[in-house]
Image (cartoon, coloured by chain):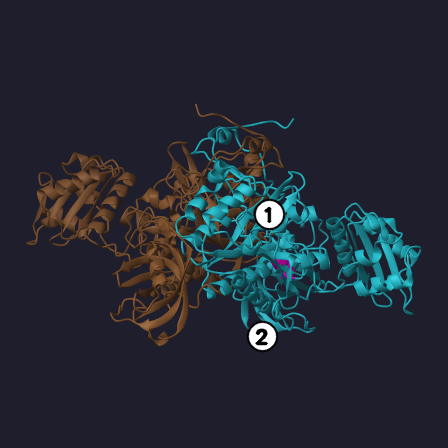
Chain colours: A cyan, B brown
Amino acid sequence: MYRTHNNNTLNINHVNKSVKLSGWVQKIRDKGFIIWIDLRDRYGVTQLVIDAERSNKQLVEQARTLGREFVIQVEGKVIERESKNTHINTGEIEVLVEKLNILNTSKTPPFTIENKTDGGEDLRLKYRYLDIRRQAVKDKLIFRSKVSMAVRNYLTQQDFIDVETPYLIKSTPEGARDFVVPSRMNTNQFYALPQSPQTFKQLLMVGGLDKYFQIVKCFRDEDLRADRQPEFTQIDCEMTFVEQEDVLQTFEGLTKHLLKEINGVSIEDFPRMTYDEAMRTYGNDKPDIRFGIKFGELNEVAQHKEFSIFNQAELVVGIAIPDGASYSRKEIDKLIDWVKRPQVGAKGMVYVKCNEDGSFKSSVDKFYDQDDLKKWAEITGAKPGDLIAVLSGKTNETRAQLSALRMEMAERLGLRNPNEFAPLWVVDFPLLEWDEETERFHAMHHPFTSPKLEDLNLLETDPGKVRANAYDLVLNGNEIGGGSIRIHDRHMQEKMFAFLGFTEEEAKAQFGFLMDAFQYGAPPHGGIAFGLDRLVAILGGQESIRDFIAFPKNNSGRDIMIDAPAKISEEQLKELHLSLIKKS
Amino acid sequence: MYRTHNNNTLNINHVNKSVKLSGWVQKIRDKGFIIWIDLRDRYGVTQLVIDAERSNKQLVEQARTLGREFVIQVEGKVIERESKNTHINTGEIEVLVEKLNILNTSKTPPFTIENKTDGGEDLRLKYRYLDIRRQAVKDKLIFRSKVSMAVRNYLTQQDFIDVETPYLIKSTPEGARDFVVPSRMNTNQFYALPQSPQTFKQLLMVGGLDKYFQIVKCFRDEDLRADRQPEFTQIDCEMTFVEQEDVLQTFEGLTKHLLKEINGVSIEDFPRMTYDEAMRTYGNDKPDIRFGIKFGELNEVAQHKEFSIFNQAELVVGIAIPDGASYSRKEIDKLIDWVKRPQVGAKGMVYVKCNEDGSFKSSVDKFYDQDDLKKWAEITGAKPGDLIAVLSGKTNETRAQLSALRMEMAERLGLRNPNEFAPLWVVDFPLLEWDEETERFHAMHHPFTSPKLEDLNLLETDPGKVRANAYDLVLNGNEIGGGSIRIHDRHMQEKMFAFLGFTEEEAKAQFGFLMDAFQYGAPPHGGIAFGLDRLVAILGGQESIRDFIAFPKNNSGRDIMIDAPAKISEEQLKELHLSLIKKS
């Protein structure tokens, strides 16, 4: 047996007890006559002591051969410490070592294994197993495990069944790019890895399983943006005989349970907002509502004056930045530069200082008088001392730009408290969105999403206006879940595929099995999928998902620890009937 | 809202209550003046009634349009039934329908959706969603979910952390064939899907996570034998600072928990047997010990007589078949034919009838007298009334043949009771096994398994004799789990790779990251992996794993429901820099 206790267990009640401990050498303090060693394992740290007086000479010599990250096993007696450390569980005792067994040595690690490390991103990824040894990273993985289990417990108690759907499925052209897997037994044919188990969970509902969930890996071969991974984890759920309200209630329940169980936070019923309102009020379909700074649309009061830039704009919209009136000219110029950065893309910014005395000073005083600006202040909710920032241009772009400014200001003003949680349902998403590139409508959610019955007549006349039975759960400005009530009628599904530009043959080849299934008594059903990586990061109060993934890939989709992807052998290629085309 | 109750809930206490129910039409009995409908959902069946007297005419007509598997919603009142059915929870009531809403129609299903179906294997796979609607299949999926959750609960309580390891990893030549995934972003390079998370879980131990588990899909591109799937599920576990005994105790605990929780069976400490003893006593490293019929080795008593077949054999070995002495000549001939089938492969069979009067009658009376045969009976444990069956030849082959006969006889004699559970640890597996084809030693478990220290000196002189710290958990004649204490020393691991025929470069290219990791304080560690598909099937008292998998593939690795694998587009191939070689 390697240990009688872990390194977080021993306390003053164990004094005089003989114990066996194992772990890593975290730190050694050699004072000549006495040597202290901090012994670390997953659970904590225990102080070991070896001294010239009480320990035999050989043991002292052996201890002097130890280095950081050596793996050791010791036997000894628990004794009371002289100088106690009240910050850790084992801080009142130390173990006087009687026997030391070196289980493994260690080279000097490439970075320090402490909460604050000197290791850069790449180095930490390459030696991920050492990075994980750091408490800060280890705790995130343990946190993730806890969240997963809380999800499972809640859903199981609600009668959901955990069903594993297949990973080797069929490639479909809809949506993002698939990873494919050549089949050896079926020459020149390929499996695809699932982007989500969407069709399978729908088939489980046709199969009468009623309530399904799965925590499942999904795959997308996309050019990676920062903080995106080619493989990611979804909490995938589906229910039968439900309307949108049933789904919202169920997963609001799950989210409340997680916030309570994991964060100790009780939240009342989640607010709801239509997609239209979210876009109008926050310029964004996943607004962070931990703070206000709402949009005020100024077209009516700012247009039809002499200011041609506003007159030509589709949208004139502003926000009130709290306490911004005190910004210096230089600070405001920097803000204008910020919104003009390519990542934001505004052409310029009009501003109004709302002075404490109720007067206004703006960058467009030439065109607008104090009464005009007073109206702006009313609409944006600006108070004396605030700065109104106004952007203008095409509606969608301008909203995105002002939303970016809103988030930036909130960040600077410290309004994005990671320990505050503000969930929000965004509902009534459009069914379709226009794609400029292909000049066609695409499914905004996916082609299985049902349109609102009352909007059906718009499908021919004004497709962009058709709303879907689709909903997103937003938490602190992040979409953590999204779903819809699905189409369960074969004819409606055929119509939808046709509308999205599928020929009858294409629809049949790709999704024939689903439309077949709809002929044999498909029940009404709907569901939701949560992004677990993101959810865990937000519950953990973090922005980046990477540390919550045990072995993440870098931005080129590489695992730099194991050096994958890599070349495969000629023999493997031959067996798969594949040949490589060299990059030209 | 689609329903106020599910179809297993209503009973005599609900009489006079107005309810809303949804489900599938299981059966319709139209007696002219009265129509009964069995309404089914996941939970159960409720009887609906519509009659000419109490219901309006329109409703009766509407009910007459229903067919099997139609999806309906009804509103009505709970009333007491005249003829009660005590077999189901809802058997005392029926619901007098007031309103009927047809949610979806159904074509006539291709097979009957009842516990006993008329659907053949292929038809059931093609319409798997209808097969799942059958109670018998649905129950197996629910059972699986329950087992998974019981596993998670137990391991979580034991401080194991659920960590997700990556699915896109690197191909290694060791072991079975990998499925590979071409990378688009890294031209001409490939990921591989994991055959198991072996190296990652070891790295988690180097990372100090101490106790890891994961229920995870694994992939092997092998020519499929019956009841093998290209993707399968593993309960994967690893622990740090453990010896073999610690691992055995922990997972014996898990298995006991499952048997208690799932099957209501309490089992005492599991017996243990060395690999050698298992092979000697049962001819098999996963013996079914629900019954005896142990091997008796007869070399000493049967050789050195006049019978040349035995004299030339490496092994002469027999079993006592209970009550077999009464077999007719014809029955015995059939048994001899059975062992001579190509699947078994014996050249012949010698038999001894142990008569009730204590005398013996054998097929080799010419060579052996009554005293000789009495010794055979003693060694095989044959009692008066039994039949001794004796095979001979090369050791390994003969053991396999007699083991097949032992299992066959147990099956015929009804000794393999699916509701009886006989777990067994098989320990002390050989480290290496000789491969005739490549004329080399291969790792019996995998190259990360540690040899027993006391056998290390044999590695140079008699490698086949070196025992490993490896163990299997056997349940009812099936290996349900296997694992080992791993190598954690870099030099030992290098030595092992060299012994297995890796060049230094190959070892570094494939497993350099692991050997690097071993330089930075790798702790002693070991673990186990259970095959979840098989485990669930056995706990469910079944032989076949297929019904416990939601969407299984057929023996050619095809999903015949979605028709995968399939061709992919030219554009996809182009993006991946791949071209197909046509099968010649």
Magenta includes A538?
yes
Residue carrying label 1: B517
Please determine if labels 2 and 1 lie on a single subunit.
no
Q: Residue furthest top?
A: B584
> Residue A165, can we see it?
no
Q: How far apart are the alpha carbons under marks 2 and 1? A: 36 Å
> Residue B233, can we see it?
yes
Residue span colored magenta: A535-540
Circle 1 packing at 10 Å, graded few (<14), some (14-19), many (20+), is: many
Residue B360 x %, y %: 9, 48
- Mark in the foreground, 2 or 1: 1
In the image, is residue B267 above or below residue A447? below
Q: Kindly identify the amino acid type of the residue bearing the numbered disc 1.
A: Ala
Magenta includes B109?
no
Circle 2 packing at 10 Å, graded few (<14), some (14-19), many (20+), is: some
Residue A68 x %, y %: 66, 55
Q: Residue furthest front?
A: B57
Residue carrying label 2: A15
